[in-house]
Image: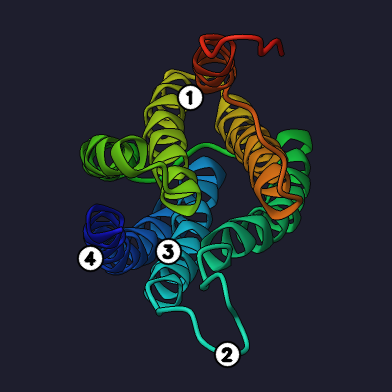
Amino acid sequence: MAEGSKGYLQGERLAYLSSWTLAMLGIIEIAAGGLTGSIGLTADGIDSMSDALVSFLVWLGLKISRRTPDERFHFGYYKIESFVAFVGAIALIGIAGAIFYRSYQSFLDPKPLNLPALALAVLLTAGTISLYRAFQMRKIARKYNIVSLRLDANNAIKDGSASFLVFFTVLTSYLGFHQMDAVGGMAVAIFILVVSYIVIKESSLVLLDAYHNPELVEEIRKIVEGRQGVRV
């Protein structure tokens, strides 16, 4: 139990730092997107801001889930972090829809970018920072099996990958294929939808008390069958 609490505390600190980092990146990307006219960069900025909100919710969920059991919640608050992951993923679906719609409109009416070098520099920086924090969070999430922090880590991987993908589409747009910038925005929306689906599936299983650990079940079966006259 102490080890689990330590993991939740580490996850809580990472999620809190992540929320502020993403918020700052999102503000910079949206501002740069406005200056350059890049819908892909703006979409990536909106994605970063939404991920900042998810990181904040994850931080809040982990903080609450560390509370000890009481008279009202006899088994503790451990499901809070899975519930937060579920709610965060639902919110991301709506944001993905809005980004895809705006990008599609830009695809139908493409325009050349202003200051493409600025857009490329911001995307490169954002992608690098996102992937760095992703590896930090994924390590803690896997070690302590924290579903909501895994959502945050997956979001960070998605965020970094999306930034590098948009970097490529902005570069292609700069070379004359102006619709590619909008394609980058639509790709960001698809990234968000895929991550949201995975998180909703995993967190739903936890909330419904589903259990899937074949290795542990097999180990228990062998122990039980090792007793004389017992078959499973």
Q: In which quarter of the view is residue 71 placed?
A: bottom right
Residue position for label 4: 13
Look at the numbered disc 4 and give the secondary structure of its residue: helix
The x, y position of residue 149, in whole percent, is: 41, 51
In this rendering, would 148 be left or right of 225?
left
The image quadrant where one finds the N terminus is bottom left
Alpha-carbon distance for marks 3 and 1? 24 Å
- Tell whether 131 sits left or right of 202: left
Residue 25: percent from left, percent from top: 31, 58
Q: Which mark lies nearer to you, 3 or 1?
A: 3
Q: In the rendered structure, are the residues bearing label 3 and label 1 in contact, judged by CB atoms less than 8 Å apart? A: no
Q: Is residue 190 left or right of residue 158?
A: right
Is residue 110 in view from this perspective?
no
Please tell me whether mark 1 or mark 2 is closer to you in this view. Answer: 2
Instruction: First in sequence, mark 3 or 1: give its number.
Output: 3
**On the image, numbered disc 3 is attached to which residue?**
52
User: At label 4, which amino acid type do we have?
Assistant: Arg
Neighbours of disc 1 within 10 Å: few (<14), some (14-19), many (20+): many
Q: In this rendered view, identify the residue nearer to me: 22 or 36.
A: 22
